[in-house]
Image: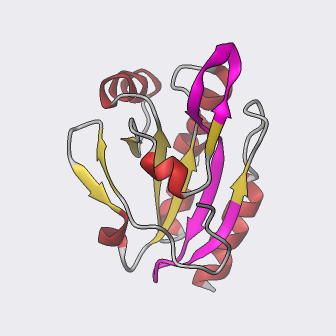
Amino acid sequence: MNPELNSKAPDFKLFNTFKKEIGLSEQKGKNVVLLFFPLAFTSTCTKELCSIRDNYAMYNGLNAVVFGISGDSLYSLGKFKEEQKLNFDLLSDFNKDVSTAYGSIYELFGFGMKGVTKRAAFVIDAGGIIKYKEVLENASEEPSYEGITSTLRALIA
């Protein structure tokens, strides 16, 4: 599946690092930023998520909640969140159902790994519609933070 801009975002429920189930449909009334990332503890993923951490007040000010989503276990994500002092939820998509629903999955990744989550960014408006979509083929690239924030700014204008 590969959802398009201005289409309804695929709903999901995933567990965060505190073993609490989080659902997209529970976020109604807020803008949502979904950041899919391949692997915790890798350099680009760390850089990306720490950038969000350092600018989280701005995202909050734009009526946005941010979720990082990876195929890592909730236990490894918990350690990663703790070590990097991340101030937003990381959600475990261990079975890759959500990554697949958002068209954000590598068939084959480095070192022969199959089914690794692609780096991708989605902005979903308060009504559950996808307003920004960026799925990166190159895992060493970061998403456009300017694209994400300008979309969020337009949603509250």
> Which sits in the foreground, 84 or 128?
128
Give the residue displayed 23% in from the left and 51% down from the top. 21
Indicate the position of residue 113 as horizontal and vertical percent values: 60, 21
Work out whether 120 lies above or below 116.
Answer: below
Give the residue displayed 22% in from the left and 38% down from the top. 18
Give the residue displayed 56% in from the left and 57% down from the top. 102
Number of numbered discs visible in the structure rendering: 0
Q: Residue furthest bottom?
A: 157
Work out whether 135 lies above or below 43.
Answer: below
> Which sits in the foreground, 90 or 72?
72
Work out whether 139 lies above or below 60.
Answer: above
Indicate the position of residue 53 as horizontal and vertical percent values: 52, 41
Q: Is residue 85 magenta?
A: no
Q: Quadrant of residue 85?
A: top left
Q: Residue furthest top?
A: 111
Q: Considering the image in quadrants, where does the N terminus appear? A: bottom right
Work out whether 102 lies above or below 29.
Answer: above
Indicate the position of residue 82 as horizontal and vertical percent values: 36, 25
Give the residue displayed 20% in from the left and 39% down from the top. 19
Q: How has the structure been colored for display? A: secondary structure
Indicate the position of residue 144 as horizontal and vertical percent values: 76, 52
Q: Considering the image in quadrants, where does the C terminus appear? A: bottom right
Q: Is residue 127 magenta?
A: yes
- Give the magenta part as a residue range: 107-133
Relative side of 109 to 99, left or right: right
